[in-house]
Amino acid sequence: MAFKAIFLDRDGVVNVDKGYVYKKKDFIFTDGIFEVLRHFQRCDYLLFIVTNQSGIARGYYSENDFLSLSRYMLKEFNDNGITITKIYYCPHSPEANCECRKPKPKMLLDAQKEFDINMSVSWLIGDKISDIEAGLRAGVQNLIYIGEGECANAHNVKSIKEAMKLIS
Ligand SMILES: [Mg+2]
């Protein structure tokens, strides 16, 4: 039996997007995120983070900086009763034209294969059009946009707390 999943973008969804965040002190969890993710877990969703991290290719921070911040984030989640099944990240620049950077769907499709995810009962939450585009291309049935303005192909909400009400 396949699993259902919620794919979360990181910056702007899990934490406040301050632009190329790589230090603990700049990593501010979004309001209500722990409560929301515990709710998703109770509803039997596996949780994934899927994030573009071009700051690595741009030399703003190293891959080790990213991994170290990820360990901190996962520890905070653990301490709050939340298990993230896996973090997928793309370290490349847009110019590299790699296969993984969103809006390409590869990171989502990798998760689907690796963990036997049924995309037709899964959700993606993002704050950029490129997140939604990746979700569409990967066949994720339910898309939630919490960014600026409106996004045509997704549920539009103002916050992660509001996104919680859509998923049960
Ligand atoms: Mg984002």
Image (spheres, rainbow, N blue to C red):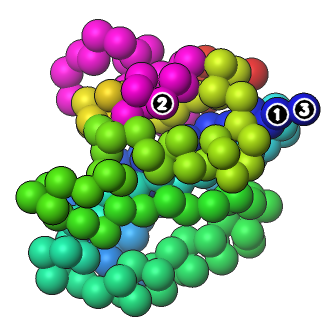
For the N terminus, which image quadrant?
top right
Residue type pointed to by label 3:
Met
- Residue pushed farthest left? 95
To which residue does mark 2 refer?
A: 138
Pick the front one: 99 or 45: 99
Residue lying at 13% horizontally and 75% vertically, measured from the top left: 58
Element under disc 2:
helix
Is residue 104 left or right of 13 when viewed as pictured? left
Label tally: 3
Instruction: Answer whether labels 1 and 3 touch (C-beta < 8 Å).
Output: yes
Residue type pointed to by label 2:
Ala
Q: Locate residue 88, reporting x and y percent.
A: 50, 60
Q: Which mark is residue 1?
A: 3
Magenta region: which residues? 134-162
To which residue does mark 1 refer?
A: 2
Q: Is residue 124 above or below residue 150?
A: below
C-alpha distance separating marks 1 and 3: 4 Å
Q: Which mark is residue 115?
A: none
Residue lying at 47% horizontally and 50% vertically, measured from the top left: 107
124 in magenta? no
Element under disc 3:
loop
The answer to whether any part of residue 78 appears in the image is yes
C-alpha distance separating marks 1 and 2: 16 Å
